[in-house]
Every structure is written in C-alpha cells, then in structure tokens.
Image (cartoon, grey):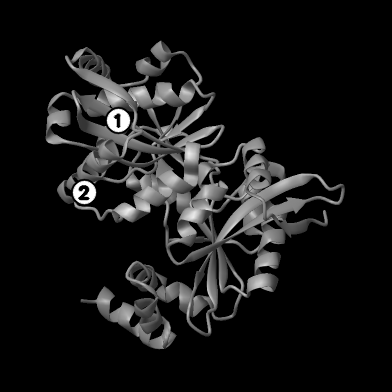
Amino acid sequence: MNLRVTTCHDRDTWDRAVLTAGGHPLQLWGWGEVKSRYAWSADRLLVQNPQGEQVGAAQVLYRRLPPPFKSLAYIPRGPVAAEADRAEVLTALAAHVKQARGSIALSIEPDWADPASPLPKGVSDEEIARIEQSAPTGWLATVAGTGFRRSANTGLIPRTLVVDVTPDEDDILKAFNSSTRQNVRKSFRAEGIRFGEVTSEADLEQVLAINKETGKRAGFAVHDDGYHHAIRDLMGERSQLIAAWEGDEVAAFVWLVVSDTTAFELYGGVSPRGMKLRLNYGLKFHAMKHVKAQGVSRYDFNGLLNDGISDFKRQFSKHEDLLIGTWDKPLSPLYPAFATALPKVRHALKRGLPAAKAKLRDPKAAVAGLRRSSNS
C-alpha cells in the first residue's frame, strides 16, 4: 500500500482525526503545544491510503540536538493506527521524518498493548523481562520487520494499569481489593468532604503545593508551576484536575488528560491529612466515575514500578497491563553511538541543551564516560 503523509496545521482538524480514531490524549494538539514551550517542536502528520482515507496519525515531537545529530523524533503514545495498518503507517512516518527533518531516529512509545497483556497482578520483573526479550510475534513481528527495534531508553513506562470503566460502578468497585473498597466508602462518608473539579487559581495553588510535598516525600522531581499552568491553559477541557476538599482545603488531587476513549493520569498527590482520611482512595474512584460519565472507556494509571505509589495503584484492579514499550527506527549511521550515549543525554536534556551538547560533542567520549560510570 502506497501511503501519503501530510502535515496538519489546524487544531480542530487534528484533534478530530485523533479522537475519531480513538487516539490517546498525549496525541492531542494541546499536548504538543505544551511540549513546544519546553525545547520541543511538534509536527502533526496524517497518513492516508491511495483512496484518500486516513489510516494513521502521529503527533511527532522533535528535540534539537547539536551537530551532527540534528534532532530526535519522538511519538508519545502514538501513532494512531489500526492493528493491520501499523507497520505500513510506521514505515511511511519514518520515511517522512528522515526526508523532512533528517532526524537521527524515530522513537515511538505507542498506546498499543503487548500481545501478552493483560497480566496477573503482581507479575514478577523476571516475567516482564522474559516477555520483552522474547521474539515478537504477529503484528509486532511485522513492525520489527520494518526496521524498528526495542529500546531500553524508556520515557513512558510500558508496565501500567488500565481500568475498564464501562461496567457499572458496582462492578468497577468489585475489582478493587476489599480493603480498598472499605477505604473508598470511608472517604465518601467522611464529614465535610467533597470531590470535584478544580476551577479556581487558589485551589490550583493548593494542588501545586501538595504536588511538591508529595514529590519530596516520595523522592521524585516535579515540574515548575509554569509547566502545570501550561497544561491547564493549552489542553483546555482535555485537562481535568480532580480534587478532594475538606472544607476549603484541598487534601488530594489527580491530574488527568482525557481523550474520547482514554483518561491518562499525569500527576497525583495527597496531603498528610488526606492520607489520614483515606481521601486518595475515594478520589481515584470519583475520578473514574467522572470520566465514565463523559463516555471514556479506559482509565490509565500511567506506569507501575516497584515503589509505594505503584503498590497503591495495584489495589484498584486484579490485573496489570503491558504496552509494547519503546521502539526506535534508526535513520542515520550515527544512531549506534547516539543510542549508547542516550541515557546520559536524556539526563542532560533535563538540564538544558548546553549540557546535552557537552555530552554529545564527542560521541566516543560520551560512550567512554558511560563505561567508566558503569564500572564505578
């Protein structure tokens, strides 16, 4: 099939194309605008067959790199394509990116379930590794046959929990642990508690304070306030910030981005008072009901690790999900040196382009530094 790739320049047209195809919220126009404020740029690419029918769509983010690497092309939770069309859509997108941008690679982290998914709750790391190291089969083997290869340089965690919110509320609750159901009900009965969507600046500031407190307590970094304001402003109604209040005080929150099919957790947090009242339990269930009422079918908890936050997430289902993870298509003979240095480059990019440039100016030195660090 000879596919044609064109660039879309209109927000409404783009979002309609993504939503009609059941795309992920990170593929919506607003997310590209958010990232474009922070050293990325975005192209929205429509893929059509010879009959002019849309068979794929991808919001491609580009991160500028110093010579000779030019840029890295990245598709978060995309492209959008039917299973039968995925390999051909990816081939067309990679050819377009190489010709139009000369990027060193096209890196994808699609919202596509691994053929082994879903998995039992608590599946071992060894079993996950076995799945990821096994030879791809079916449609995924066809994707691999186009030159894409698995990459360990992951941005979005493929091991996650996706809850089907199409059943009635009682059936959704039944999938929770018994203690989790008790905590949900306890939080709903607590005096002076309400759940809803954050709309005021004052409440947003309370949310951001809890986010910083949660990050400090759990040991993870958080974005600055301007980044969060950009999500609210540029994602519009697709950004949905849900909170629990005790009186006028925000005690817990979950920040979602939402497409027509999928609600995706960006951030969440709870105050010490909110933890005491178990409000984070009730809030999760309220958020599921909130998006269910909009016709959303999937609630994605956004990543599972071996930490306390992930243990909390696992209480809301009897299974786990596994997406296919990160796959790269090399577009330059320089890709092997770049891929070897990428873990340090990713870290440097978080501190800005000058630091990244220092890492990449001499690929051989970057690789040598990696070897030294791995042996220290």
Q: Residue furthest front?
A: 201
Question: Residue 299 appears at what percent x and percent y?
Answer: 44, 31
Name the residue rendered at 27%, 81% in the picture.
372
Q: Are marks 2 and 1 in contact (CB under 8 Å)?
A: no
Q: Secondary structure at mark 1?
A: strand
Give the camera-side residue of 88 and 136.
Answer: 88
Q: Which residue is mark 2?
A: 212
Quadrant showing the C terminus? bottom left
Question: Residue 310 appears at what percent x and percent y?
Answer: 28, 39
Q: Which residue is mark 1?
A: 243
Q: Up-down: is 14 above or below 291?
A: below
Question: Residue 220 appears at what percent x and percent y?
Answer: 24, 53
Q: Residue 317, can we see it?
A: no
Q: Residue 297, can we see it?
A: yes
Name the residue rendered at 53%, 73% in the picture.
71
189 relative position to 353: left or right:
left
Q: Name the kind of residue labelled 2 in the image.
A: Lys
The mark tally for this picture is 2
Give the camera-side residue of 45 and 13.
Answer: 13
Give the camera-side residue of 320 and 363.
Answer: 363
Gap between marks 2 and 1 measured at Cα: 16 Å
Q: Up-down: is 340 above or below 293?
A: below
Crowding around mark 2 (Cα neighbors within 10 Å: few <14, some 14 to 19, many 20+) is: some
253 relative position to 105: left or right:
left
Name the residue rendered at 71%, 52% in the picture.
46
Q: Name the kind of residue labelled 1 in the image.
A: Ala
Question: Residue 189 appears at what percent x and percent y?
Answer: 21, 12
130 relative position to 261: left or right:
left
Q: Secondary structure at mark 2?
A: helix
Q: Earlier in the sequence, mark 2 or mark 1?
A: 2
